Image (spheres, rainbow, N blue to C red):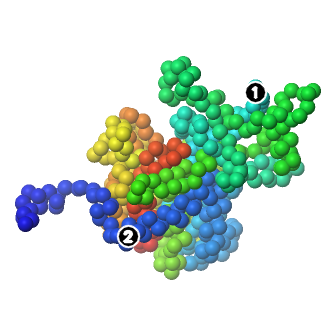
Amino acid sequence: MSKEKSEAKKLQEKLFDKKKHLGLIMSDEEIKESFDFCEGYKKFLDNAKTERAAVKTAVEMAEKRGFTEYKRDEKLKAGDKIYFVNRGKAVILAIIGTESVEKGLRVTAAHIDSPRIDLKQNPLYEENELALFKTHYYGGIKKYQWTAVPLALHGVMIKKDGEILNINIGEDDNEPVFCISDLLPHLAAEQYKRHLGDGIKGEELNVIVGSMPFRDDEISDKVKLGIMSLLNEKYGITEADFTSAELELVPAHKARDIGFDRSMVGSYGQDDRVCAYVSLKALLDCKKEKVKKTSMVVLADKEETGSDGNTGLKSAYLRYFIYDIAAALGADGRDVISNSECLSADVNAAFDPTFPDVLDKRNAAYLNKGVCVTKFTGSRGKSGTSDASAEFMGRIRVLLDKNKVIWQTGELGKVDLGGGGTVAAYLANLNMDVIDIGVPVLSMHSPLEITAKTDIYMTYKAVQAFIKDS
Ligand code: MN
Ligand code: MN
Protein backbone atom coordinates (compact mmCIF):
# COMPACT_ATOMS: atom_id res chain seq x y z
CA MET A 1 0.00 0.00 0.00
CA SER A 2 1.42 3.37 -1.03
CA LYS A 3 1.92 5.86 1.72
CA GLU A 4 0.45 9.36 1.55
CA LYS A 5 3.03 11.95 0.55
CA SER A 6 4.04 14.05 3.51
CA GLU A 7 3.33 17.78 3.51
CA ALA A 8 7.04 18.47 3.31
CA LYS A 9 7.41 16.18 0.30
CA LYS A 10 4.54 17.93 -1.48
CA LEU A 11 5.98 21.33 -0.67
CA GLN A 12 9.38 20.26 -1.93
CA GLU A 13 7.91 19.10 -5.23
CA LYS A 14 6.13 22.42 -5.57
CA LEU A 15 9.04 24.68 -4.66
CA PHE A 16 12.22 22.92 -5.74
CA ASP A 17 13.54 22.80 -9.31
CA LYS A 18 14.51 19.21 -9.99
CA LYS A 19 15.37 18.15 -13.52
CA LYS A 20 14.36 14.61 -14.38
CA HIS A 21 15.82 12.13 -16.87
CA LEU A 22 14.00 12.39 -20.20
CA GLY A 23 13.66 8.61 -20.21
CA LEU A 24 11.24 9.05 -17.29
CA ILE A 25 9.30 11.95 -18.78
CA MET A 26 8.96 11.31 -22.50
CA SER A 27 6.31 8.91 -23.82
CA ASP A 28 7.37 5.71 -25.58
CA GLU A 29 6.28 7.23 -28.89
CA GLU A 30 8.29 10.37 -28.29
CA ILE A 31 11.40 8.39 -27.40
CA LYS A 32 10.97 6.35 -30.58
CA GLU A 33 10.53 9.60 -32.52
CA SER A 34 13.78 10.92 -31.11
CA PHE A 35 15.62 7.72 -32.07
CA ASP A 36 14.13 7.85 -35.60
CA PHE A 37 15.07 11.53 -35.88
CA CYS A 38 18.70 10.63 -35.25
CA GLU A 39 18.82 8.23 -38.23
CA GLY A 40 18.65 11.30 -40.50
CA TYR A 41 21.09 13.09 -38.25
CA LYS A 42 23.70 10.34 -38.54
CA LYS A 43 23.45 10.44 -42.34
CA PHE A 44 23.97 14.20 -42.21
CA LEU A 45 27.09 13.73 -40.06
CA ASP A 46 28.55 11.25 -42.55
CA ASN A 47 27.84 13.56 -45.50
CA ALA A 48 28.90 16.80 -43.85
CA LYS A 49 32.32 16.22 -42.31
CA THR A 50 33.70 19.59 -43.37
CA GLU A 51 32.18 23.07 -43.59
CA ARG A 52 32.13 22.86 -47.39
CA ALA A 53 30.43 19.45 -47.33
CA ALA A 54 27.94 20.72 -44.72
CA VAL A 55 27.00 23.68 -46.93
CA LYS A 56 26.56 21.40 -49.94
CA THR A 57 24.42 18.96 -47.96
CA ALA A 58 22.32 21.74 -46.37
CA VAL A 59 21.66 23.34 -49.77
CA GLU A 60 20.64 19.99 -51.27
CA MET A 61 18.24 19.41 -48.38
CA ALA A 62 16.86 22.96 -48.66
CA GLU A 63 16.34 22.81 -52.43
CA LYS A 64 14.29 19.65 -51.97
CA ARG A 65 12.02 21.71 -49.72
CA GLY A 66 11.63 24.50 -52.26
CA PHE A 67 14.36 26.90 -51.15
CA THR A 68 16.04 28.89 -53.93
CA GLU A 69 19.25 30.89 -54.04
CA TYR A 70 18.67 34.57 -53.28
CA LYS A 71 20.35 37.31 -55.30
CA ARG A 72 20.48 40.86 -53.99
CA ASP A 73 17.66 43.19 -55.15
CA GLU A 74 15.29 40.32 -55.95
CA LYS A 75 11.75 40.99 -54.76
CA LEU A 76 10.55 39.06 -51.75
CA LYS A 77 7.15 38.20 -50.30
CA ALA A 78 5.75 36.26 -47.37
CA GLY A 79 6.31 32.54 -47.71
CA ASP A 80 9.43 32.84 -49.88
CA LYS A 81 12.12 30.32 -48.98
CA ILE A 82 15.61 31.47 -49.81
CA TYR A 83 19.26 30.72 -49.13
CA PHE A 84 22.56 32.49 -49.58
CA VAL A 85 25.92 30.72 -49.73
CA ASN A 86 29.03 32.59 -48.61
CA ARG A 87 32.15 31.29 -50.42
CA GLY A 88 31.02 27.69 -50.20
CA LYS A 89 31.74 27.59 -46.46
CA ALA A 90 28.78 29.25 -44.77
CA VAL A 91 25.08 29.42 -45.62
CA ILE A 92 22.09 31.46 -44.48
CA LEU A 93 18.60 30.09 -45.05
CA ALA A 94 15.40 32.05 -44.51
CA ILE A 95 11.63 31.85 -44.72
CA ILE A 96 9.99 35.24 -45.18
CA GLY A 97 7.26 35.65 -42.56
CA THR A 98 3.80 37.14 -42.84
CA GLU A 99 4.49 39.88 -40.29
CA SER A 100 6.45 43.04 -41.12
CA VAL A 101 10.15 42.22 -41.06
CA GLU A 102 10.76 45.46 -39.15
CA LYS A 103 9.35 43.74 -36.08
CA GLY A 104 12.46 41.59 -36.10
CA LEU A 105 13.78 38.23 -37.19
CA ARG A 106 14.05 34.88 -35.50
CA VAL A 107 17.67 33.91 -36.10
CA THR A 108 19.19 30.56 -35.16
CA ALA A 109 22.96 30.35 -35.66
CA ALA A 110 25.11 27.24 -35.48
CA HIS A 111 28.59 26.48 -36.78
CA ILE A 112 29.61 23.83 -39.29
CA ASP A 113 33.38 23.85 -38.85
CA SER A 114 34.86 21.34 -36.39
CA PRO A 115 38.33 20.75 -34.98
CA ARG A 116 40.48 18.83 -37.43
CA ILE A 117 43.96 18.48 -38.95
CA ASP A 118 44.74 20.85 -41.85
CA LEU A 119 47.61 20.35 -44.29
CA LYS A 120 50.37 22.94 -44.35
CA GLN A 121 50.97 24.71 -47.65
CA ASN A 122 54.10 22.63 -48.42
CA PRO A 123 52.89 19.36 -46.94
CA LEU A 124 54.51 16.52 -48.85
CA TYR A 125 57.95 15.22 -47.88
CA GLU A 126 59.94 12.01 -47.65
CA GLU A 127 61.82 10.78 -44.61
CA ASN A 128 63.46 7.38 -44.34
CA GLU A 129 61.56 6.11 -47.36
CA LEU A 130 58.13 7.06 -46.06
CA ALA A 131 56.04 9.81 -47.65
CA LEU A 132 54.35 12.12 -45.14
CA PHE A 133 52.25 15.30 -44.90
CA LYS A 134 53.12 18.18 -42.57
CA THR A 135 49.97 19.48 -40.85
CA HIS A 136 48.65 22.30 -38.70
CA TYR A 137 45.75 21.46 -36.41
CA TYR A 138 42.56 23.55 -36.61
CA GLY A 139 40.63 24.42 -33.45
CA GLY A 140 41.20 23.14 -29.92
CA ILE A 141 42.25 19.51 -29.99
CA LYS A 142 43.95 17.15 -27.57
CA LYS A 143 46.64 16.23 -30.06
CA TYR A 144 47.30 12.74 -28.70
CA GLN A 145 43.72 11.73 -29.56
CA TRP A 146 44.41 12.13 -33.29
CA THR A 147 47.20 9.56 -33.64
CA ALA A 148 46.63 5.96 -34.69
CA VAL A 149 43.11 6.62 -36.01
CA PRO A 150 42.09 6.32 -39.68
CA LEU A 151 41.80 9.76 -41.30
CA ALA A 152 40.02 10.82 -44.48
CA LEU A 153 41.22 13.70 -46.65
CA HIS A 154 38.74 16.37 -47.77
CA GLY A 155 39.00 19.73 -49.43
CA VAL A 156 39.77 21.69 -52.54
CA MET A 157 42.84 22.47 -54.61
CA ILE A 158 43.00 25.36 -57.02
CA LYS A 159 45.24 24.38 -59.92
CA LYS A 160 47.54 26.75 -61.77
CA ASP A 161 44.97 27.19 -64.55
CA GLY A 162 42.26 28.00 -61.99
CA GLU A 163 40.55 24.64 -62.17
CA ILE A 164 38.92 23.66 -58.88
CA LEU A 165 39.68 20.14 -57.79
CA ASN A 166 37.47 18.59 -55.11
CA ILE A 167 39.22 15.99 -52.99
CA ASN A 168 37.45 13.34 -50.92
CA ILE A 169 39.49 10.23 -50.11
CA GLY A 170 38.88 7.73 -47.33
CA GLU A 171 35.14 7.83 -46.67
CA ASP A 172 34.34 4.90 -48.95
CA ASP A 173 35.36 1.53 -47.45
CA ASN A 174 37.21 0.70 -50.67
CA GLU A 175 39.38 3.78 -50.49
CA PRO A 176 42.64 4.12 -48.56
CA VAL A 177 42.87 6.21 -45.39
CA PHE A 178 45.74 8.10 -43.80
CA CYS A 179 47.22 7.96 -40.32
CA ILE A 180 49.37 9.84 -37.82
CA SER A 181 51.73 7.41 -36.12
CA ASP A 182 52.42 7.23 -32.39
CA LEU A 183 55.30 5.75 -30.45
CA LEU A 184 55.07 2.13 -29.29
CA PRO A 185 54.72 1.88 -25.47
CA HIS A 186 57.91 -0.19 -25.31
CA LEU A 187 59.91 2.88 -26.33
CA ALA A 188 57.76 5.60 -24.84
CA ALA A 189 59.57 6.02 -21.51
CA GLU A 190 60.71 9.54 -22.41
CA GLN A 191 57.37 10.44 -24.04
CA TYR A 192 55.54 9.38 -20.85
CA LYS A 193 57.47 12.06 -18.96
CA ARG A 194 55.93 14.78 -21.10
CA HIS A 195 52.82 16.63 -19.94
CA LEU A 196 49.69 15.20 -21.56
CA GLY A 197 49.24 18.33 -23.67
CA ASP A 198 52.69 17.73 -25.16
CA GLY A 199 52.27 13.95 -25.41
CA ILE A 200 52.11 14.55 -29.12
CA LYS A 201 53.43 17.95 -30.20
CA GLY A 202 52.03 20.01 -33.07
CA GLU A 203 55.02 19.29 -35.29
CA GLU A 204 54.64 15.57 -34.59
CA LEU A 205 51.21 15.43 -36.22
CA ASN A 206 52.77 14.06 -39.41
CA VAL A 207 50.52 11.97 -41.60
CA ILE A 208 51.76 8.85 -43.37
CA VAL A 209 50.63 8.89 -47.01
CA GLY A 210 52.79 6.32 -48.80
CA SER A 211 55.77 3.97 -48.76
CA MET A 212 56.46 2.62 -52.26
CA PRO A 213 59.37 4.07 -54.26
CA PHE A 214 59.36 5.26 -57.84
CA ARG A 215 61.59 2.67 -59.55
CA ASP A 216 64.77 4.48 -60.49
CA ASP A 217 68.35 4.18 -59.29
CA GLU A 218 69.42 7.72 -60.02
CA ILE A 219 67.16 9.96 -57.95
CA SER A 220 66.59 10.66 -54.26
CA ASP A 221 63.09 11.11 -52.72
CA LYS A 222 61.82 8.10 -54.64
CA VAL A 223 58.79 7.54 -52.39
CA LYS A 224 57.78 11.20 -52.62
CA LEU A 225 58.10 10.96 -56.39
CA GLY A 226 56.02 7.76 -56.35
CA ILE A 227 53.20 9.61 -54.55
CA MET A 228 53.51 12.76 -56.70
CA SER A 229 53.41 10.73 -59.91
CA LEU A 230 50.28 8.93 -58.65
CA LEU A 231 48.62 12.25 -57.83
CA ASN A 232 49.71 13.73 -61.15
CA GLU A 233 48.24 10.78 -63.03
CA LYS A 234 44.95 10.87 -61.11
CA TYR A 235 44.39 14.62 -60.66
CA GLY A 236 46.85 16.30 -63.02
CA ILE A 237 48.50 18.19 -60.14
CA THR A 238 52.09 19.11 -59.31
CA GLU A 239 53.57 19.77 -55.86
CA ALA A 240 53.03 23.54 -56.23
CA ASP A 241 49.26 23.01 -56.39
CA PHE A 242 49.28 22.17 -52.65
CA THR A 243 50.07 25.82 -51.93
CA SER A 244 46.64 26.90 -53.22
CA ALA A 245 44.66 24.24 -51.41
CA GLU A 246 42.54 23.78 -48.31
CA LEU A 247 42.94 20.14 -47.37
CA GLU A 248 41.53 18.82 -44.12
CA LEU A 249 41.99 15.47 -42.41
CA VAL A 250 39.04 14.22 -40.39
CA PRO A 251 38.32 10.88 -38.71
CA ALA A 252 37.26 8.40 -41.39
CA HIS A 253 34.76 6.54 -39.21
CA LYS A 254 31.02 6.91 -39.58
CA ALA A 255 28.45 8.05 -37.02
CA ARG A 256 27.32 5.15 -34.84
CA ASP A 257 24.86 4.40 -32.07
CA ILE A 258 26.47 4.14 -28.65
CA GLY A 259 25.35 1.82 -25.86
CA PHE A 260 23.41 -1.46 -25.59
CA ASP A 261 20.25 0.65 -25.62
CA ARG A 262 21.41 2.69 -28.66
CA SER A 263 20.45 5.82 -26.74
CA MET A 264 23.44 7.91 -27.81
CA VAL A 265 25.19 9.00 -31.00
CA GLY A 266 28.96 8.72 -31.32
CA SER A 267 30.57 10.66 -34.13
CA TYR A 268 33.20 13.10 -35.22
CA GLY A 269 32.06 16.70 -35.65
CA GLN A 270 28.94 16.82 -33.49
CA ASP A 271 30.23 20.17 -32.20
CA ASP A 272 28.45 21.82 -33.80
CA ARG A 273 26.86 19.90 -36.62
CA VAL A 274 24.32 18.56 -34.15
CA CYS A 275 22.90 22.06 -33.65
CA ALA A 276 23.41 22.83 -37.35
CA TYR A 277 21.31 19.81 -38.27
CA VAL A 278 18.49 20.39 -35.78
CA SER A 279 18.30 24.10 -36.70
CA LEU A 280 18.25 23.33 -40.41
CA LYS A 281 15.64 20.60 -39.94
CA ALA A 282 13.47 22.85 -37.78
CA LEU A 283 13.41 25.49 -40.52
CA LEU A 284 12.96 23.04 -43.42
CA ASP A 285 10.14 21.21 -41.61
CA CYS A 286 8.15 24.45 -41.17
CA LYS A 287 4.97 24.93 -43.09
CA LYS A 288 5.55 28.35 -44.60
CA GLU A 289 2.02 29.54 -43.82
CA LYS A 290 2.85 29.02 -40.16
CA VAL A 291 5.85 31.34 -40.14
CA LYS A 292 4.86 34.77 -38.91
CA LYS A 293 8.29 36.19 -38.12
CA THR A 294 10.88 36.02 -40.88
CA SER A 295 13.06 33.14 -39.73
CA MET A 296 16.68 32.55 -40.50
CA VAL A 297 19.16 29.77 -39.89
CA VAL A 298 22.82 30.69 -40.17
CA LEU A 299 25.36 27.90 -40.56
CA ALA A 300 28.70 29.60 -40.00
CA ASP A 301 32.33 28.70 -40.49
CA LYS A 302 35.43 29.49 -38.40
CA GLU A 303 33.84 29.31 -34.94
CA GLU A 304 36.54 26.93 -33.75
CA THR A 305 39.26 29.48 -34.54
CA GLY A 306 37.46 32.49 -33.08
CA SER A 307 34.93 33.44 -35.81
CA ASP A 308 37.39 35.71 -37.63
CA GLY A 309 37.59 35.70 -41.41
CA ASN A 310 35.01 36.36 -44.10
CA THR A 311 33.06 33.16 -43.46
CA GLY A 312 33.08 33.50 -39.66
CA LEU A 313 30.39 35.34 -37.73
CA LYS A 314 32.58 38.35 -36.96
CA SER A 315 32.32 39.04 -40.70
CA ALA A 316 29.72 41.46 -42.07
CA TYR A 317 28.05 38.91 -44.34
CA LEU A 318 25.13 38.20 -42.03
CA ARG A 319 24.49 41.91 -41.52
CA TYR A 320 24.68 42.54 -45.27
CA PHE A 321 22.25 39.72 -45.95
CA ILE A 322 19.78 41.07 -43.39
CA TYR A 323 20.11 44.56 -44.91
CA ASP A 324 19.46 43.13 -48.38
CA ILE A 325 16.34 41.36 -47.19
CA ALA A 326 15.18 44.44 -45.32
CA ALA A 327 15.63 46.55 -48.48
CA ALA A 328 13.78 44.01 -50.61
CA LEU A 329 10.86 44.16 -48.18
CA GLY A 330 10.95 47.94 -47.86
CA ALA A 331 12.20 47.95 -44.27
CA ASP A 332 15.04 49.63 -42.41
CA GLY A 333 17.86 47.13 -41.77
CA ARG A 334 18.71 48.76 -38.47
CA ASP A 335 15.18 48.18 -37.14
CA VAL A 336 15.14 44.62 -38.42
CA ILE A 337 18.36 43.75 -36.61
CA SER A 338 17.58 45.63 -33.41
CA ASN A 339 14.20 43.92 -33.01
CA SER A 340 15.56 40.46 -33.71
CA GLU A 341 15.91 37.53 -31.37
CA CYS A 342 18.58 34.93 -31.76
CA LEU A 343 19.39 31.45 -30.57
CA SER A 344 23.10 30.77 -30.68
CA ALA A 345 22.79 27.03 -31.13
CA ASP A 346 25.96 25.36 -29.95
CA VAL A 347 26.89 22.39 -27.81
CA ASN A 348 27.87 22.55 -24.17
CA ALA A 349 29.90 20.24 -21.96
CA ALA A 350 27.94 17.34 -20.47
CA PHE A 351 28.72 16.11 -16.96
CA ASP A 352 31.11 13.17 -17.19
CA PRO A 353 31.09 10.85 -14.14
CA THR A 354 34.68 9.88 -14.93
CA PHE A 355 35.77 13.51 -14.60
CA PRO A 356 33.33 14.97 -12.06
CA ASP A 357 35.66 17.66 -10.73
CA VAL A 358 35.65 20.06 -13.67
CA LEU A 359 31.97 21.00 -13.55
CA ASP A 360 29.83 22.42 -10.78
CA LYS A 361 27.34 19.57 -10.45
CA ARG A 362 24.57 21.97 -9.49
CA ASN A 363 24.95 23.98 -12.70
CA ALA A 364 26.27 21.48 -15.23
CA ALA A 365 24.31 20.00 -18.11
CA TYR A 366 23.66 16.26 -18.16
CA LEU A 367 22.97 13.77 -20.93
CA ASN A 368 19.25 13.03 -21.35
CA LYS A 369 18.02 16.05 -19.41
CA GLY A 370 17.02 18.09 -22.43
CA VAL A 371 18.20 21.04 -24.45
CA CYS A 372 20.81 23.00 -22.55
CA VAL A 373 20.14 26.73 -22.16
CA THR A 374 23.32 28.62 -21.35
CA LYS A 375 22.93 32.20 -20.15
CA PHE A 376 26.63 32.98 -20.39
CA THR A 377 29.89 31.39 -21.50
CA GLY A 378 33.36 32.98 -21.39
CA SER A 379 36.29 32.56 -19.04
CA ARG A 380 37.39 34.03 -15.70
CA GLY A 381 35.08 36.96 -14.84
CA LYS A 382 32.69 36.16 -17.73
CA SER A 383 35.26 37.51 -20.16
CA GLY A 384 34.20 37.18 -23.79
CA THR A 385 30.53 36.46 -23.21
CA SER A 386 27.43 38.37 -24.21
CA ASP A 387 25.54 37.10 -21.11
CA ALA A 388 21.84 36.99 -22.00
CA SER A 389 19.58 39.28 -19.98
CA ALA A 390 17.22 37.93 -17.33
CA GLU A 391 14.39 39.24 -19.51
CA PHE A 392 15.45 37.23 -22.55
CA MET A 393 16.26 34.15 -20.46
CA GLY A 394 12.78 34.52 -18.96
CA ARG A 395 11.19 34.80 -22.38
CA ILE A 396 12.96 31.66 -23.68
CA ARG A 397 12.14 29.72 -20.52
CA VAL A 398 8.44 30.47 -20.89
CA LEU A 399 8.56 29.67 -24.61
CA LEU A 400 10.15 26.25 -23.99
CA ASP A 401 7.76 25.37 -21.17
CA LYS A 402 4.75 26.43 -23.24
CA ASN A 403 5.85 24.12 -26.05
CA LYS A 404 6.66 21.20 -23.71
CA VAL A 405 10.34 21.34 -24.57
CA ILE A 406 12.33 19.83 -21.71
CA TRP A 407 15.35 21.96 -20.95
CA GLN A 408 18.17 22.34 -18.47
CA THR A 409 20.86 24.89 -17.80
CA GLY A 410 24.56 24.40 -18.31
CA GLU A 411 27.90 26.09 -17.99
CA LEU A 412 31.31 25.57 -19.51
CA GLY A 413 33.16 24.35 -16.46
CA LYS A 414 33.83 25.47 -12.91
CA VAL A 415 34.67 29.13 -12.39
CA ASP A 416 38.34 29.85 -13.16
CA LEU A 417 38.95 26.34 -14.48
CA GLY A 418 38.85 27.13 -18.18
CA GLY A 419 35.97 28.23 -20.31
CA GLY A 420 35.18 29.02 -23.89
CA GLY A 421 32.79 30.89 -26.10
CA THR A 422 30.32 30.60 -28.93
CA VAL A 423 29.10 32.91 -31.68
CA ALA A 424 26.54 34.42 -29.27
CA ALA A 425 28.68 37.45 -28.50
CA TYR A 426 29.13 38.42 -32.16
CA LEU A 427 25.40 38.25 -32.78
CA ALA A 428 24.65 40.18 -29.61
CA ASN A 429 27.14 42.82 -30.74
CA LEU A 430 24.87 43.47 -33.73
CA ASN A 431 22.24 44.53 -31.15
CA MET A 432 20.05 41.43 -31.07
CA ASP A 433 18.81 39.54 -28.03
CA VAL A 434 20.83 36.31 -27.97
CA ILE A 435 21.01 33.22 -25.82
CA ASP A 436 22.97 29.98 -26.17
CA ILE A 437 21.06 26.75 -26.46
CA GLY A 438 22.30 23.34 -27.54
CA VAL A 439 23.02 19.70 -26.98
CA PRO A 440 25.25 18.49 -24.10
CA VAL A 441 28.29 16.58 -25.40
CA LEU A 442 30.77 14.16 -23.85
CA SER A 443 34.36 14.04 -25.17
CA MET A 444 33.87 17.37 -26.96
CA HIS A 445 36.42 18.08 -29.74
CA SER A 446 37.58 14.44 -29.79
CA PRO A 447 37.36 12.16 -32.84
CA LEU A 448 34.31 10.49 -31.23
CA GLU A 449 32.00 12.95 -29.50
CA ILE A 450 28.96 11.55 -27.67
CA THR A 451 25.46 13.01 -27.49
CA ALA A 452 22.10 11.67 -26.28
CA LYS A 453 19.29 11.18 -28.78
CA THR A 454 16.61 12.61 -26.49
CA ASP A 455 18.60 15.84 -26.06
CA ILE A 456 19.07 16.14 -29.83
CA TYR A 457 15.33 15.79 -30.32
CA MET A 458 14.53 18.33 -27.60
CA THR A 459 16.92 20.81 -29.22
CA TYR A 460 15.11 20.31 -32.52
CA LYS A 461 11.81 20.98 -30.74
CA ALA A 462 13.29 24.07 -29.08
CA VAL A 463 14.33 25.64 -32.39
CA GLN A 464 10.99 24.70 -33.93
CA ALA A 465 9.15 26.38 -31.07
CA PHE A 466 11.33 29.49 -31.45
CA ILE A 467 10.57 29.73 -35.18
CA LYS A 468 6.84 29.08 -34.86
CA ASP A 469 6.15 31.20 -31.78
CA SER A 470 4.86 34.67 -32.42
MN1 MN B 1 30.78 24.72 -30.85
MN1 MN C 1 33.95 23.69 -30.28
Front disc: 2 or 1: 1
**Does residue 154 show up?**
no
**Residue 348 x %, y %:** 43, 49
The circle drawn on residue 370 is: none
Lower sequence index among marks 2 and 1: 2
**Residue 378 x %, y %:** 43, 42
**Residue 206 x %, y %:** 67, 33
- To which quarter of the image does residue 461 belong? bottom left
Residue in view at x 39 percent, y 47 percent:
350
Question: Which kind of residue does numbered mark 1 sit on?
Answer: Glu
Rendered-image quadrant of the N terminus: bottom left
Relative horizontal placement of residue 196, taking residue 237 as reference (left or right): left
Residue in view at x 32 percent, y 61 percent:
23
**Does residue 75 show up?**
yes
Please give the residue where the numbered disc 1 appears in the rendered image: 127
Which element carries disc 1, helix, strand or loop? strand
Question: Which kind of residue does numbered mark 2 sit on?
Answer: Glu
Tally the numbered discs.
Answer: 2
Rendered-image quadrant of the C terminus: bottom left
**Furthest residue to the front?**
186
**Residue 325 x %, y %:** 60, 68
- To which quarter of the image does residue 16 belong? bottom left
Please give the residue where the numbered disc 2 appears in the rendered image: 30
Which element carries disc 2, helix, strand or loop? helix
